[in-house]
Image: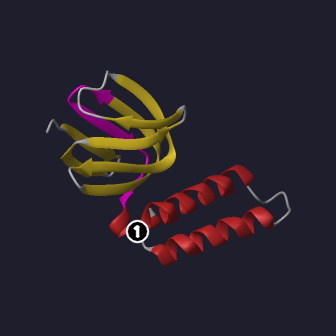
Amino acid sequence: MKTMHVSIVTPNGPVLEMDATMLSTKAISGELGILPGHISMVAPLDITNVRVKQNENVVKVAVSGGLLEVRPDSITILAQAAEHADKIDLERAMKAKERAEKRLSEKGDAIDVHRAEIALRKAINRINTINM
């Protein structure tokens, strides 16, 4: 079966390096499913999860935005932050979600609404990545 090399890299270094038979994720423009031999492309990623399939094994990674580069034999994701599903602390993610929701429910000038919304989306993404 044909494979492609998948790399997920953050400013702190590589998070994932593996050969895969399929990758699926969500770009800002919509859902993407990529197989070996896919046409070359570049797409900005949303706060989302990445599912990398290697035969029957699926590796899930939560990413906090970034850039996806596809070539026929490789995929590179340059992410602002990325975390393997099996390394996500669910309790910590739930607390982060609660803090963000609390900040958004408060009315006042001291709240940076945009920042709180992003924190909420990141926390929900981490929770969803675990529960996929």
The total of numbered circles placed on residues is 1
Instruction: Name the side, left or right, on which 10 lies relative to 127.
Output: left
Write the start and end of the magenta stretch as one range.
Answer: 70-84
Check the image and report above or below for 59 versus 36. Answer: below
Residue drawn at x 42%, y 52% is: 81
Question: Where residue 13 sits in the image (x, y, percent)?
Answer: 28, 50
Quadrant housing residue 39: top left
Secondary element type, mark 1: loop
* Left or right of 120 in this view: 37: left
Query: Residue 79 placed where, x, y %?
Result: 40, 44
Majority secondary structure of magenta residues? strand
Q: Is residue 82 magenta?
A: yes
Q: Quadrant of residue 7?
A: top left
Q: Is residue 16 left or right of residue 50?
A: left
Q: In the depicted view, which residue is nearer to us: 126 or 22?
A: 22
Residue type, mark 1 in image: Ile
Q: How is the image coloured?
A: secondary structure
Residue closest to the eye, 47 or 100: 47
Q: Give the position of the C terminus as an image quadrant.
A: bottom left
Q: Position of residue 73 (x, y in %)?
A: 20, 29
Q: Residues within 10 Å of mark 1 (few under 14, many from 20)?
A: some
In x, y percent, where is residue 36? 23, 32
Q: Is residue 26 above or below residue 122?
A: above
Q: Residue furthest left?
A: 1
Q: Would residue 110 be counted in the magenta stretch?
A: no
Residue, x 48% and y 33% (percent of image)?
A: 44
- Residue under label 1: 88
